[in-house]
Image: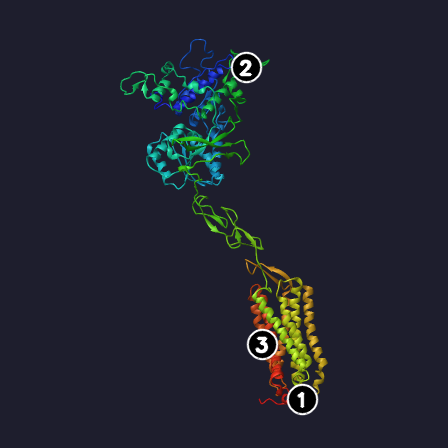
Amino acid sequence: MPEPLRCTGRIEPRELHFSCAMIFAIEEINNSSKLLPGIRLGYQIHDSCSSVPMAVKVAFQLTNGLDPVFYFGDNCSQSGMVMAIVGESGSSPSISMSRIIGSFNIPQVSHFATCACLSNKQQYPSFFRTIPSDQFQADALAKLVKQFGWTWIGAVRSDSDYGNNGMASFLKAAYKEGICVEYSESFNRFHPRSRIQRVADVIRRSKAMVIVAFAGFGEMKLLMEELSRDSSPPRQWIGSEAWVTHPDMLKFTFCAGAIGFAIPRSVIPGLRDFLLDLPPTKVAASPILTEFWEDAFNCRLEKSDGTDKRLCDGTEDLQQLQSPYTDTSELRITNMVYKAIYAIAHAIHNAVCQETNSTTQCNKLSRVESKQVLTHLKKVNFSQNGYHMSFDANGDPVATYELVNWQKSKSGSLELVTVGYYDASLAVGQELHIYKTITWVDGRTKVPMSVCSDSCPPGTHKVLQKGKPICCYDCIPCAEGEISNTTDSSDCFPCPKEFWPNAERDTCFSKPVEFLSFSEILGILLAAFSVGGAFLAAITATVFFHHRTSPIVRANNSELSFLLLFSLTLCFLCSLTFIGAPSEWSCMLRHTAFGITFVLCISCVLGKTIVVLMAFKATLPGSNIMKWFGPPQQRMTVVSFTFIQVLICTVWLVVSPPFPMKNLTTYKDRIILECALGSALGFWAVLGYIGLLAVFCFVLAVLARKLPDNFNEAKFITFSMLIFCAVWITFIPAYISSPGKFTVAVEIFAILASSFALILCIFAPKCFIILFKPEKNTKKHLMNKNPS
């Protein structure tokens, strides 16, 4: 047969402290005149040694209704009848016990089992606890990690129900908060040392600065001892309540700066005096107290062979003992034990007592079943020492935690400092509140960084690294025309149509508006040439008018010459309408004025060419052709040709006139203000008609260029038309390919170039003769035949 289960190892002073707190609470209730007056509660205390098999053995022992020792006398009226069980301290033993006693409707109230799985009432119908579920602590830890911007963490846990379920809940909450885990390691205090070493090596090699430890005290103590054997990089520890408030953990000074959640501190009046009231007779009567006493003071109560410990001489003083047993400075879990006892007492009270005329009457002889206690336990609602106690539908209390920080005291030792709190009953986003300065790892005052990748600044966006978690990414600048104005943006978004990003690509600014203006150099030059051309035409007209009776002016059809100079002046000046911000009227004016003035100009040149050609034909004997090309006919020709262009322009303006528009496509980073053609057919019809007249004029001038007399000006018209046609032929591809405001500049250049070609080729030679060669300005010279 297997050996009977026995506890081995040293006694845990903290668990003894909890047991004594339970006895204190029961004695306090037994002496109360308000709670269960006249009824005394009895108790049994068993040591499970934090072992699941031992806890199962105890559970069976308690449910079979038999005491290991039968009490004779009148102290107990119902010996062996278990009304409720307080415990266990761990989740795994509590789960094992609850599966057994739940079938017998025996309520179990735990003070330290926090596994969220125990909230499942279908599996654990009789389980209650005075400590919050790990589901709340997991959410709190995830919010804490998120609060300080840690997105790359390590995780260690106990390989137990407490650690595995708690870490699973934390990882689920952390994932929702966008937190990534570099590693997640589990271990148990019963594992071989090689397993603990492997976990320690993973921590040393990792890049995560922050480690979340969801583990029991036993596991964390072993891990810290292993880490202390060999130096490791400093780490920021985040702890669960099972170890972060344990007094024995504070000896690991390399973990200074650790933070975690703890059960709120409390005050239990009279408890310290009760704990210190251990007379020698009481100690000697209890094997547990004897073991504790001998271990605490390193002496023996009785002389024994095989040991070198000294005999206890009576000078041992519990008042001076620094132990978790005597420590009542921060009663956290102790208060959970205290609440559990009072919750059970209130349930029994409600089952056997009644309020009558402001007095409480309790039926001492009433046989109370555990099922009755279970029913009333679900409804308890009381306050004790200022602490409220009630259970929700899952048997859980309201979740409140203190945020504690391991800070070095002036003496150099570590101490727990409360720096904030977490209240799950508050509104979403307001649960966590920090009101004191936190000391971080290595005594730093600045929050340590723990990220896989640095935050992406505005102007960039995150691109995940292949094969790595979502917290590992590269920061890629936003594409052209897009911005991101937040840190760690997952994507960039385009600016509105009339906006463009700044150089940092984190803000959209209005695009600069561009048009050919009078304030820029190009606009000033073109305007200067335009005005200069008009001034030149006016000077030429003045010269011609002053010498209007001279042979060369009279021979060149002075009426058409003056009309041509007037049209050239308009041609020069119409280019000014192309400069400046486009408006509805300027867009219509610039194209129609240009088309009509140029047709008027070409019509005059065409009239002069026809006159020259017909004048020589009229010299043939018997010819009277000149009567058909007199001044009236010349005027009619000019008016007719010009009227056709006016008609084309009128139709264009009526059907689909030019209009101002914002060109957003030519340049991405700026807006071009320009005149849309409205109807492209109308624009090319205007240009085509001008071109048709120019070609016709050019052909006639070529035919008349070799007529014999000096009177012949057809050769000059030929040159002028040649330049005119060349300019406008090259204008078409240049106009189409020129971007933005340069389209307008090309059109102005074509207007000015062709206008200067006409005025210089046709009028410059005549002005030269009038002003500098007056001897050639005679009828005789004009009538001479050309030598060639």
Give how far apart the Cα atoms at labels 3 and 2 are: 122 Å
Name the amino acid, label 3: Ile
**Is the C-beta separation of discs 3 and 2 under 8 Å?**
no
Q: Nearer the viewer, mark 3 or mark 2?
A: 3
Looking at the image, is mark 1 or mark 3 earlier in the sequence?
Answer: 1
Q: Is residue 57 above or below residue 457?
A: above
Horizontal side of residue 63 vs 538, given as left or right? left
| Residue 448 visible in this rendered orientation of the protein | yes
Compute the Cα span from label 1 to label 3: 31 Å
Side (left or right) of 298 relative to 106: left
Q: Secondary structure at mark 1?
A: loop
Quadrant hosting residue 602: bottom right
Of badges 1 and 3, nearer the viewer stands 3
Of 572 and 465, nearer the camera is: 572
Per the rendering, the mark at residue 723 is 3
* Whether residue 703 can be seen here: no
Q: Amino acid at mark 1?
A: Thr
The picture places residue 37, in percent across and down from the top left corner, at 52, 13
User: Which mark sits nearer the N-terminus, 1 or 2?
Assistant: 2
Residue with the mark numbered 1 = 619
398 above or below 466?
A: above
Question: Is disc 3 placed on a helix, strand or loop?
Answer: helix
